[in-house]
Image: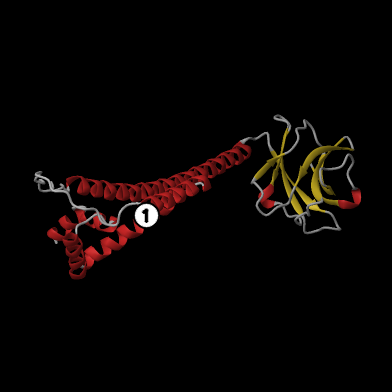
Amino acid sequence: MEDIKAYIESGILELYVLGDVTPDERLQVEEMALKHPAIKAELDAIERSMELYAKENEVEPSDNLRHRVLGSILTNFGDDNNFPQKAQPHKTNIVPLPPRKESNFYKYAFAASLALLVASSVALISVYSRLKESNTQLITLQLQNQHFSNRVNLMDRELSILRDPSFKLLRLEGTPKNPTMAVTVAFSPVHQKVMIDMKNVKLPQNDKDHQYQLWALVGGKPVDLGVFDAAADSIDMKEMKSIARADAFAVTLEPKGGSVNPTMDQMMVLGKF
């Protein structure tokens, strides 16, 4: 197994794919691929990587360059036809030296560098994917933490209202026309605050063109305290407009945004101190 691993890491497989091996080396690689599935799998992987790399970095030559190359080829073919078919050998006293045997060190070094580049690219893609996933998980945790923090703040606010003796709880009962409806209001003349217990609102969910409007009756005159929606996912407590004194509270159904005066035939609930 170690011999196969060393053979794969030698760079000979990359050179084979590039076509830069001797006939003996090519025969050796093909024999090793037939004997060892691991080497065959590595060859297939290198070929796919080479094809992907070539496809990602291919450059389309310009029309001008294509014409110049074709013209040069045609010119060379024409020049070749002018040469004599067979040159007459000349006698010489020069003894040719044997050709210098080319070292394969640089070829193997190039192949090993290419293999390292491919492996590094794969590793970088994997690291980027894990980093992106971790970043998504971090954002999710931050949102969950923010939601939890907001929830805790709302609960603290509710407890502060229940513990504050200046707040008075008033249950607004449904009118004879709407007997099942109810709204609970917390009112503090000291802090001049009015809060609606949204979790216990018993009102039909309003449509997009209408909203419920809270009114305070002061000296027999209605005072606008703001609008709200009877949604299923409402917050626990909703703070309305400030007022220092109120004899009673009422809720009417009004056009979206509220009305200047309450629509009396749309009164839903009413409560007096």
Question: Residue at 20% across / 53% down in the picture?
Answer: 9
Quadrant location of the N terminus?
Answer: bottom left
Location of residue 207 in the rendering, given as x and y in whole percent from the top left corner: 78, 54
Q: Which of 135 and 48 is in front in this view?
A: 48
**Image quadrant assignment for residue 26:** bottom left
Relative placement, left or right, of 188 versus 86 is: right
User: What is the number of callouts on the image?
Assistant: 1
Q: Does the rendering let one see residue 61?
A: no
Relative placement, left or right, of 185 versus 86 is: right
Question: Residue at 67% across / 49% down in the picture?
Answer: 234
Quadrant location of the C terminus?
Answer: top right
**Image quadrant assignment for residue 250:** top right
Q: Which of 227 and 42 is in front in this view?
A: 42
Above or below, comparing residue 157 to residue 209 in the picture: above
Location of residue 133 in the rendering, given as x and y in whole percent from the top left corner: 43, 49
**Image quadrant assignment for residue 206:** bottom right
Relative placement, left or right, of 148 versus 18 is: right
Kind of residue sitting beneath label 1: Asn
Q: Nearer the viewer, residue 154 or 258?
A: 258
Q: Does the rendering let one see residue 95?
A: yes
Mark 1 residue element: helix
Location of residue 205 in the rendering, given as x and y in whole percent from the top left corner: 75, 56
Location of residue 33 in the rendering, given as x and y in whole percent from the top left corner: 21, 66
Residues packed near mark 1 inside 10 Å, few (<14), some (14 to 19) or many (20 plus): few
Relative placement, left or right, of 73 versus 192 is: left
The residue at which mark 1 appears reads as 81
Query: Which residue of the protein is positioned furthest toward the bottom in this rendering?
Result: 34
Question: Residue at 91% across / 52% down in the picture?
Answer: 265
**Applied colour scheme:** secondary structure
Question: Residue at 27% across / 64% down in the picture?
Answer: 41
